[in-house]
Image (tube, helix red, strand yellow):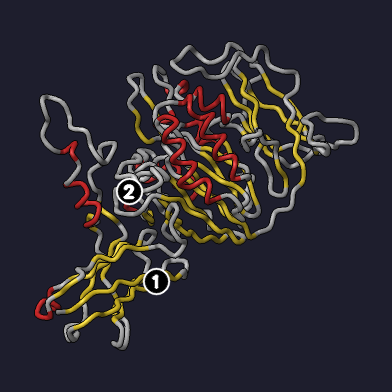
Amino acid sequence: MGLFAYSVQAQEMATGIVFRDLNKNGIQDKGESPLPGVCVSNGQEVFKTGKDGKWSLPGSQDVGYFVIKPAAYMTPVTKDQIPQHYYMHKPKGSPALEVSGVSATGPMPKSINFGLWEQKEDKKFKALIFGDTQARGLTEVNYVTHDVVEECIGTDAVLGISLGDIVADDPNLFKEINESISKIGIPWYNIFGNHDYNRGATDDRFSDETYERFYGPSTYAFEYGQVVFISLKDVYFDATGKYKSHFTEQQLGFVKNYLAHVPQEKLVVLVMHAPIVYCDNRKEMFDILKDRPHTLSVAGHTHTMSHVFADEKMGWYGKTPHHHFINATVCGSWWCGIKDESGIPHATMNDGGPNGYSEISFDGNTYSIQFKAARRPADYQMNIYLPDDINQADLDTTTVLVNVFAGSSKSKITLNVEHHEGWTTLEFSPMRDPGVAAMAKYNPFLQSMVNGTKMDTVFGWEMDNPSISRHIWKGKLPSNLPQGTHRLTIKSTDMFGQVAIGHRIFRVR
């Protein structure tokens, strides 16, 4: 039974059946049996189907019903690979906004049925994770396409997730960016971000109307293998259009009600746009998760990449710190930067890392995360900062800085110079990346006005100010290096045991 209590006093109810859709036509035909044990939700209450496959949930004039895809089953997808796991009920449609939302659906259907079919799902699988594609106009849709989508074609990942800010304040572009990402050829799930907002909305519940037209409810869940994914809209808008990072009571209720049906041995992955540590009521969400042994949360939004290990200071009271991963952004820092020979900006992120995406590899209820820089070799995982030429007398005072893009406080970074025995451990030293800090000095938007107008900038859009990078290490060279050319090697071993190697050649004079 569902984990809720409600009154039958004149409240509209939605009902339906979950069934095995053997011919994948969306209709329960003769011989297509009901599916028991499948969860269906209205975004707060959760109902688990019995032997007859039936479900029943309270209705309203603005609600999305969705089936939670169980492991080893699949829902239909559109030609753009968008999962069709939902039914939006809006009898009068979305309110009139700058960009259209959901059309009027009319009265509640007599039965809202969800057809699923079986598919093979291994306990080992991979998911592609895109943060902030954030396209302004078709030019930047093309950047997304050529910079990351084309290289993902042929991936062995079985699904993908975009972590919000799919577009940059123009929900009309959902269509074009969906069409491009669909060419990767795998089901693609989408999260709502603050730049996916419907301008003109005077209530948070209307902020995602166009998102709902393309993707369905902005809070939903699905399962694959031994992993449970829960999508949460964690940007909350007030009547003036300002937002904060916040979970609604309905969302908290949904997570609590749904997880009551989820075995403890499964890995629960929350996916959202703004980092969970930004949420003003994160402790309420943490309290729901704290007794579960396997959890992870993933977000975008910051145009940086970092691993946060939430503890009691952040409101987490589980046995071990909660791992929150802030993913790299596809757009880097707003598609800003000098264009390369193919016409795509360098798009360096605010922490000095290149723009790109991540691949999460799951094995049962364990996981590892691998970063991939856009259009770069897979082994490009760090930048090493060291002068090309060093006076022998300055060796004692010369610092090696290393930005390991996907590194964390749990990474071990070591240094070796050719022909010198042993490896020296570098010191974890969060700071502004020197490369991106140098670029910011030349951002013409930061310079004086010319005839009362901002100067045109070779960087395209205005660069964000550099942020503190949470994945920089520093160390010293051996003080007894002879004059000549030397090879420096950096070895990074991350929290998952993954090793990355980088080299830099320099001269001692």
* Quadrant in which the C terminus appears: bottom left
Residue at image location 13% in from the left, 38% down from the top: 447
Residue that mark 1 sits on: 501
Label 2 vs label 1: CA separation?
A: 21 Å
Viewer-side residue, 113 vs 318: 113
85 displayed left or right of 177 = right
Amino acid carrying mark 2 in the image: Met
Q: Position of residue 490 (x, y in %)?
A: 33, 73
Residue 41, percent from left and from top: 63, 32
Which residue is tagged 2? 349
Q: Position of residue 458 (x, y in %)?
A: 25, 40
N-term mark: 2 or 1 = 2
Q: Residue 12's quadrant in the figure? A: top right
- Residue 312 placement: quadrant: bottom left
Secondary structure of residue under mark 2: loop
Numbered disc 1: secondary structure: strand
Quarter of the image with the N terminus in it: top right
x, y percent for residue 147: 45, 46
- Report the front residue among 50 and 498: 498
Does 192 sit left or right of 239 as displayed? right
